[in-house]
Image: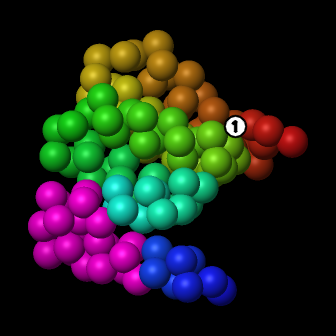
């Protein structure tokens, strides 16, 4: 593992510790740093989206959720989270679409082969 990857993992772990303590602004800042350092870091985008959703920053959460589903289109939790984000923003059609993709995955299907 490169130094940058190790650093991103350490930042991610530190951010997750802040989430556990309810310190979401601190966690969000660290998750943002993770994805700046490693733009293809799925876990960072997913966690960033969930933390943003919990603080009410729904539009930015959707952006992070879309990055997560772009990076790992067959991840059930990513689509479920994105659906929740869309619901929070009143985007019901988009939420239903994301929920449908999550359902396909839950039944053992694939979104992208």
Q: Residue furthest top?
A: 93
SS state under label 1: helix
Q: Is residue 98 left or right of residue 20?
A: right
Residue 72 percent location from the top left of the image: 66, 50
Residue 24 drawn in magenta: yes
- Give whichever of 51, 36 is nearer the camera: 36
Residue at 21% x, 48% y is: 54
Residue 98 percent location from the top left of the image: 54, 30
Q: Which residues are magenta?
A: 10-30
Residue 106 is at least partly visible in this image = no
- Taken as a whole, is the magenta stretch helix, strand or loop? helix
Residue 13 figure quarter: bottom left
The residue beneath circle 1 is 104
- Give whichever of 8, 21 is nearer the camera: 8
* Location of the N terminus (image quadrant): bottom right
* Location of the C terminus (image quadrant): top right
- Give whichever of 98, 22 is nearer the camera: 22
């Amino acid at each position: 593992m490169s130094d940058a990857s190790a650093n991103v993992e350490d930042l991610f772990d530190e951010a997750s510790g802040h989430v556990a303590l309810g310190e979401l602004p601190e966690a969000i800042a660290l998750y943002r740093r993770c994805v700046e350092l490693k733009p293809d870091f799925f876990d960072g985008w997913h966690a960033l989206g969930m933390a943003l959703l919990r603080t009410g920053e729904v539009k930015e959460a959707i952006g992070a959720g879309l990055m997560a589903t772009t990076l790992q289109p067959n991840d059930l939790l990513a689509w479920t989270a994105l659906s929740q984000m869309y619901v929070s923003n009143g985007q019901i059609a988009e939420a239903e679409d994301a929920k449908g993709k999550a359902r396909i995955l839950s039944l053992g299907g694939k979104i992208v082969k």
